[in-house]
């Protein structure tokens, strides 16, 4: 079961990041869609903030090394946030701002 969950989560995460990279939507709008339509407590961007964007980027780089056909947009979005010091909850900001 874990293998299948990880593959589905990877696809959701990557496609959500790609939609943001293409300028089609925002992290907040995508998260809200997941919360409203699937009754989840958090969407993929809030979950990535909880994991840490640096960790998510490392995972995405691993996937890309194994699958060169994957789009670069998701990694570029993550790299921009990380370059701005936004690592997620652990740094106080990621896709969202967090109080100290």
Image (cartoon, grey):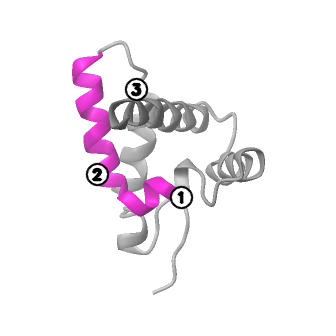
Q: At 54% from the left edge and 48% from the top edge, which residue is drawn?
A: 44
Q: Is residue 91 visible?
A: yes
Magenta stretch encompasses residue 97: no
Instruction: Report the residue marked by disc 1.
Output: 46
Magenta stretch holds residue 58: yes
Callout in the foreground (3, 1): 1
State whether residue 40 is above or below residue 73: below
Q: Secondary structure at mark 1?
A: helix
Mark 3, residue position = 72
C-alpha gap between disc 2 and disc 1: 14 Å
Q: Front-most of 30 and 3?
A: 3
Q: Circle 2 sits on which residue?
A: 55
Residue furthest right as drawn = 36
Horizontally, residue 70 falls left or right of residue 97, namely: left
Q: Name the residue rendered at 34%, 47% in the picture.
A: 56
How far apart are the alpha carbons under marks 3 and 1?
A: 21 Å
Residue 84 visible in rendering: no
Residue 62 position within the rendered picture, expressed as x and y whole percent measured from the top left: 23, 31
Quadrant location of the C terminus?
A: bottom left
Give the SS element for disc 3: loop
């Amino acid at each position: 079961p874990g293998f299948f969950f990880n593959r589905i989560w990877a696809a959701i995460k990557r496609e959500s990041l790609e939609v943001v990279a293409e300028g089609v939507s925002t992290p907040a709008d995508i998260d809200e869609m997941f919360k409203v339509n699937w009754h989840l407590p958090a969407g993929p961007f809030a979950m990535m903030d909880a994991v840490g964007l640096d960790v998510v980027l490392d995972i995405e780089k691993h996937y890309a090394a194994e699958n060169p056909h994957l789009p670069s947009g998701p990694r570029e979005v993550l790299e921009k946030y990380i370059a701005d010091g936004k690592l997620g909850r652990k740094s106080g900001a990621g896709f969202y701002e967090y109080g100290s």
